[in-house]
Image (cartoon, rainbow, N blue to C red):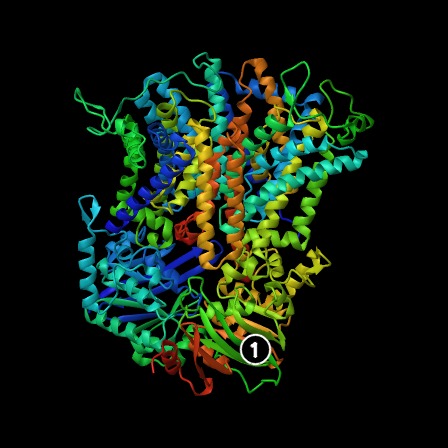
Amino acid sequence: MKLKSTKLLLNATLLILVLSIIRLITGASDLTSIGTASAALLLSVPIVLAGVGGLFSERSGVVNIGLEGMMILGAWAGGFIGSKHGPWLGLAAAIFFGAVGALVHAVATITFGVDHVVSGVAINIIAAGLVRYLSTLLYQGGSWPGPSQSPDISSIATNGLPVLSGGTYAGWHSPDILTPLAEKHWFFISDVAAILRGLTGDLSYVTVVAIAVVPLSFFILWKTSFGLRLRSAGEAPIAAESLGVNVYLMKYAGVLISGGLAGLGGGFLAIVAANHYQENQVAGRGYIGLAALLFGNYRPGGILAGAGLFGFADALQLRDSAAIHALILLIVLVLAYLVYRDIRKGKHVSAAISAIMSAAFLWFYLAVDVLPGQLVTMTPYIATLLVMSLASQRLRMPAADGIPYRRGGLR
Amino acid sequence: MKKPSMSQVMLAFAAPLAAAVVSIVISSLAVLASKKSPIDAYKTMWEFGTQAGSLLEVLNTATPYYIAAIAIAVTFRAGLFNIGVEGQLRLGALFSAYLGAKFVLPPIFHVLAVFLIAMTVGGIWAAIAAYLKVKRGVSEVISTIMLNSLAGGLTSFLFSQYFAEITEGSNNLTTKTLPESARMPDLMPLLNKLGVEDQPGGGVYGMLLVAAALGVAFWFIVNRTRFGFELRASGANPIAARVSGVNSKRMVFYALVISGAIAGLSGLPAVLGDTHSYTMGFRSGIGFSAIAVALLGRNGAVGMAFSALLFGFLEVSSRSLELIDIAPETYVIMQGSILLSSVIAYEVVRRYKITLQSKELAKAVA
Amino acid sequence: MSVAVELRHISKRFPGVIANKDVSMKVETGTVHALVGENGAGKSTVMKILYGMQRPDGGEILVNGQAVNFKNPNDAIDASIGMVHQHFMLADNFTVLENIILGAEPKHGITIDFAAARKKVADMSAAYGLDVDPDILVEELGVGQRQRVEILKVLYRGARILIFDEPTAVLVPQEVDDLFNALKGLRAEGMAIIFISHKLDEVLRVADDVTVVRAGSTVAEVKSKDVTARQLAELMVGSELPQPTTHGDTRRPEITLALKDVSIPTKSGSRDLISHISFDLHAGEVIGIAGVEGNGQAELVEAIMGLREYTGQIEFKGENIDHFTVAHRHDAGIGLIPEDRQRQGLMMASPLWENRILGHQRSKPVMRGFVLDKKATIADTRTIMQEFDVRAPGPQTLAAALSGGNQQKFIVGREMSKAPSLLVASHPTRGVDVGAQAAIWEELRRAREKGMAVVLISADLEELIGMSDRLLVMLRGAITAQLDPQKTTPEQLGSAMTGAK
């Protein structure tokens, strides 16, 4: 355990070091600014929630492509209830709506044995259609400003880490040490300060709760008997049944928790990341959450890392396309590393392919000064594909994940 | 071979019937929620939808659905899931409209060339997912979803930056209009001969015939050829298929690329039959609705034809709901509830069939 | 001594099948009670009923004199009944400890008290001589150790009545000895043990009492000291048990299959999955591959079939086939009875006639040109069903509806229909009833006489010894011994399989 956290710290340091070098070379200061770090965190949260949601579902043996639809339901409910009754009730409604979507998925897959991916995709299609229908009704009824947008929602208070990042505690205004440090633009030191300030300052309380979901899910799944039983339903359901575990119950629990978390993620998008619901707000984040789950190899810590990566890419594309341009240089470096690795392993063909791609990206970096907006928006999806293509082969998914289960081993 | 028994016939209809009932109940609840009468809604839809003009429009709506559903069914039959039809068809439509206007060929050849462009582009886009699946183990479900988003960005980038021209007298961006030789003839003259009168609002896409031909080819190849058998075997039991001599990686590649190529065609009905160019208003969502069409039609050539027509009918006829102050989007609820209740009903019937067969077996053995 | 368990006239029907008609038995504490019957006689069903996994349609269950009505395994566990399953019920990705405590976790507040669990398991391991590391992942364990985990699981729950469902099926003779010693220890503790088996000599070695079921009904209850194996067999099947034997030497001079230095290296560079395997197999010869499961037999089959890349050379009928694809090898005349019929040999949700095509989709009678000849296929399927006595209504029946024995006969029929020169038979009679077993053996005998070469892989040592002309023993991927079956006993073969001298 100690070794693991040391390694993590080392990797994080290394990553920041690389980023600060790129910042120096390219002058893209937004790469490691406070704003980017804070936006990355904000954009990571829904993905973390979706990913951890997926974790509960898939650990219980139910593949959940429907996360996207559950997030859509959550986002819509967040906008609908949040604009009427305030943000906290909005979040509660988001959880509830996500869980309702999950209930449909659970009934179809667990009780009726429908193929998990089919059911999930059906739920995504239905969720998108349903909220469109409901939004239209509300707009026609005159209570919404548009057929694809909810009224504004009041915001949830924020705070910062005391001493380091400002914030207010019982009337005491904490100093903010990191911000001035970040503004010095010292190599590496300012970068670290800025990232820390971005991650710990002006946090919405909901963000804190959402990030706490990660250790909490680890605790539940690996330290409690509920978690052991839930995981047994995904690894060896028939064995679990033979020991008196109620496999159906565990799967229902896994899928419902999954939907609640995904719904919360959707609600977060509407209430915290924005201040109203908007059609297409979710924009594939449920799927990206699933990708984070796979990247994290079905472990909470890995999901956090994956979500952080996607959040960072998303934040950069939203804030500053110059920074994305700089990021191309990072791709060149990653590919160069792959070339080095493949040559050492004697894989000359794939080394050559990586080398060609690396050269192409380098050329692209040098040839193009500013990336057009439409291409910049593609960043998170490209990141997902790249990461998946690197991470997929070492996956260890739960042994009975996606396999319809019937009591007594019937077909 | 024995003739199918009465109970088998009943079974075949049980699932769609149950699904229809459930979805009518759900849709009625949705209409009731907006404080309107479902009976009125259905009546209005039926009256409007069965007018000759509406029916022709239903055909036009169903045509791309059907082609796209075939594309999806190819992968379903192989145990894969190409969710990326939306992106494949969009790129296919854009490139074929843009490139097709760049050259001139004799009429039929020009159309075929446009087909080829659309199929190549769709196939290449799907090949990315195939490569990632075969070489890097990435689930095609995730990769095709991501490729959809990428295709969206890429088309709008290429379209707005390079391919589009501003039409005179308006702000609309479109690609250059396709020459006469690259257009699909309208089927209306043909229908006239069959006694159908001209209807206000236009004709019937020539792509309808292509869709029908594709349906026949799909049925034959999947059910009657070795390739089709190996495709289905890979879907039914990939391990047993591999043991039996199917090259599973190649099969994944073929299935996804063929699917992408067909998907590329599904973007053409409007381009070749109506707008004759790629426009900003290119219809979105065909690829997703087609998933529902394929699932509802059990990935069969005939079943998907019916479900494509049903979806087209619901979509066209629901426009009339505006007349009685009901949101036309109600059709989305109808389609969704049909989809979900039918996949559940099919599964229930499948289980019941196995039970039934075990009973027959016991009788035969005893 | 008191009666621990009594079953009275248990009956159970599944859709279309009568699994139990009238099963009765009486098990006393401090005894080992064997329940014998052939595959498909209903032994497993009656035990699933006793363990609460299924509910009887009729009859009574008494535990320690009390009538009970189990709704699920929890009820049975509460009545101190435990079951060691034939197919191990273990989660590979869980540790031994997690597997043992699942469903009965000791708690410490809201968390699992792993320390207390670990201590209890260690104590039990020591007390019963069931040594196993609690913190290792189950996937890293061998078969014998997995069984220990299963037994610990049961004991951990305080079971006093232990059901062992075919516990020796996957064990080598030495492991069987260990198991029987453990059983005797448990019996001495005053536990009641129900031992399900169809291996009669083992039953007579370990059991005090024997209940025999045939076709779902109890046909006899006897003391083991009063009967012979032959008498039990007659009670079990109504006639003598079929013996796996071959007659005479049918070996022909030509070599059908030759392996030269075949190895499968692993990607990680650790020990080869199979290493430096060489042998010649003549036409009309059966070569038996013995070995504890997971010692490279499956990989050997994959190499011969071209399902995995290997180094070295394989020759078939004098021709090098290293560059042949899987399909090519099928078509050249190599037949395969796969290890796991449902996973590797059948499309369970498809009708039999479509399953007939599998592996034969490149030639007649299934194909006419590139078009599938449905009519001819159905006709041919019907022929196979008749010749191999596959009991099903017709070619349209789904494979899933057939019993295991009939599925296996169908696969054998399918492979034999192309008259292969070489048959790779992996566990050809595993889990099939006596009738099907005899039929499959007979088929192999006949084909052998006609010059077919057979690579036979089996865990049934009597089958290996009886059917083979030559035995090769595989251990950790290599061939470690070559034995003459006529001079080899199961015990000697077992020793060779575990590498003991």
Give the number of marks.
Answer: 1
Q: Which residue is mark 1?
A: C258
Whether residue C190 appears in this view of the structure is no
Q: Residues within 10 Å of mark 1 (few under 14, many from 20)?
A: many
Report the front residue among C33 and B306.
B306
- In the foreground, A123 or B16: A123
- Looking at the image, which residue is at 27% across and 27% down? A179
Residue B264: x %, y % from top left: 64, 37
| Residue B309: percent from left, percent from top | 64, 31
Place of residue C63 in the rendered image (x, y in percent of width and height, measured from the top left): 25, 59
Image height of B74 relative to B272, above or below: below
In the rendered image, residue B232, in percent from the top left (x then y), is placed at 60, 51
Position of B230 with respect to A267 (left or right) is right
Which corner quadrant of the image does residue A25 belong to?
top left
Q: Evaluate whether residue B15 shows in this view.
A: yes
From the viewer's side, name the closer residue of C165 and A18.
Answer: A18
- Tell me the subunit letter for badge 1: C
Q: Which SS class for mark 1? A: strand
The reply, left or right, for residue C278 in relation to residue B70 is left
Q: Quadrant of residue B285?
A: top right
* Residue type, numbered disc 1: Ala
| Residue with the most extreme right position | B193
Q: Is residue B280 left or right of residue A62?
A: right
